[in-house]
Image (spheres, rainbow, N blue to C red):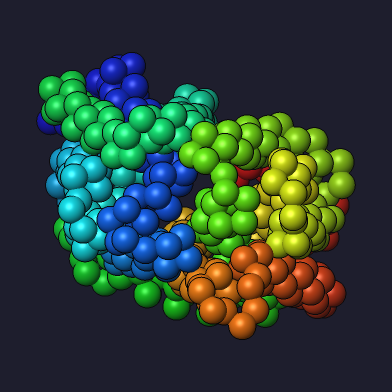
Amino acid sequence: MMEKPIQHGKAALGFIFVTIFIDVLGLGIIIPILPQLLEELGHVDISMASQYSGWLTFTYASMQFLFAPVLGNLSDMIGRRPVLLFSLLGFGIDYLFMAFAPTILWLFAGRLIAGIAGASTTTATAYIADVSSGDKRAANFGLIGAATGLGFILGIGLGGFLGAYWIKLPFIVAAGLALLNALYGYFVLPESLIMRNRRRFEWKRANPVGSLLRLRKYSMAISTLITAYTIVYIGQKAIESVLPFYLIEKFQWTLHSISALGVFIGLLIAGIQGGFVRWTIPKFGLRKNIMAGIAFYGIGLIMIAFNNVGWLMYVYMIPYCLGGIGGTALQGFISENVPANEQGELQGALASLVSLTTIVGPLMMTTLFHHFTIKGASVYFPGAPFLLGALLMFISVILTIRSFKKKDPKLLPQNAITPTPNR
């Protein structure tokens, strides 16, 4: 007798939406309040607090890099439901650690737990793939983008608003949401992976290093583009990891001011990635979008590095966020030039590369910021990480130009490419 798939309704998809939303909400909440929290717990200045922030991100990203493929493969064996519930429980515990941590060491313990549990988006994507088919699959995958954008914007705003009343209140709210959603999911979330589609757990398939090594088989032109893609992500860490510390150090911004800028950035990114890129890619093609976008990143970072007027941050963020057209087009171009039967392997390898940049990039940028802002520094220059980020962007532009000039038959002519925005 054939096994019948479990029926999944709106409640299950709603749970997936909320799970991803809470995951990203927690990341957004941390951005405006982490500098002050680290200053208070460590009894240090903003320069040293940035260094702690880099090590916290390193801890989280390292655990996520190691354990995301493990949990992904585990979900293929035992099902999606237990892994999703475990992830939510892990995030809830992490937020509680951050809310009630008496020392910075407790924050590291929380980040360890969150990193191990941080496969919720991967497993949630697999859940949607399990329960969707045909036209509904694309529509349901749209839940991930919507939840990510909404969670990030509201998280930053909520972090600044609640943190102004009590620095630990945002973490308590995030912990409550995560644990309540885990409890809700325990009662309403059905398993999506039927028994006949499960497989044995294999350590060799849960190895992130193996995924990266498989990138060696691609042509020199594609490998050069992948290198450029990696460097772009490292350069982006200047904004992602240093910006709040920079705003406090250079302009003495408050939590409300940082949150307002964060919401503005989130709306810019949503507008560019969700709408503008859909016009620029068909209009100008992938190659021009790649080079222009990465150049915009570099121009924006240079402006921010040498900025001396606080309100101009809003102006300079516009060219920086326009750089998003380059990252989207670059990933799309790489994907278009790899065979259809290798797409899953490629995307998995690119995801592993992005995880590696999150391990290396923030620590590099926060260390540079600390070096140029520490008391007694021979040169005081808080914009140094942004200048390094700009340099990395321009190196990426040179690499992409070199790749496009290579006489590689595997690189499709631009007219043969059907752009797929926002991939």
Q: Nearer the viewer, residue 8 or 187?
A: 187
Residue 162 to residue 64: above or below: above
Residue 162 to residue 96: above or below: above
Q: If the image is split into quadrants, where does the C terminus sit?
A: top right
Q: Position of residue 47 (x, y in %)?
A: 48, 65
**Drawn side of residue 209 relative to residue 236, left or right:** left
Q: Nearer the viewer, residue 66 or 415?
A: 66
Total numbered circles: 0
Q: Nearer the viewer, residue 290 or 360?
A: 360
The residue located at (42%, 62%) in the rendering is 45
Q: If the image is split into quadrants, where does the N terminus sit?
A: top left
The residue located at (81%, 71%) in the rendering is 401
**Drawn side of residue 326 relative to residue 346, left or right:** right
Q: Position of residue 25 (x, y in %)?
A: 40, 36
Asked where in the image residue 79 lies, by quadrant, the reply is top left
Residue 407 to residue 169: above or below: below
Q: Nearer the viewer, residue 37 or 401?
A: 37
The residue located at (74%, 55%) in the rendering is 308
Q: Is residue 83 visible?
A: no
**Drawn side of residue 395 relative to residue 136, left or right:** right
Residue 47 to residue 251: above or below: below
Q: Position of residue 217 (x, y in %)?
A: 54, 78
Q: Position of residue 153 (x, y in %)?
A: 51, 33
**Drawn side of residue 288 relative to residue 206, left or right:** right
Q: Is residue 45 visible?
A: yes
Point out the residue furthest to the top here.
Answer: 10
The residue located at (72%, 72%) in the rendering is 391
Asked where in the image residue 231 lies, by quadrant, the reply is bottom right
Point out the residue furthest to the front here.
Answer: 376
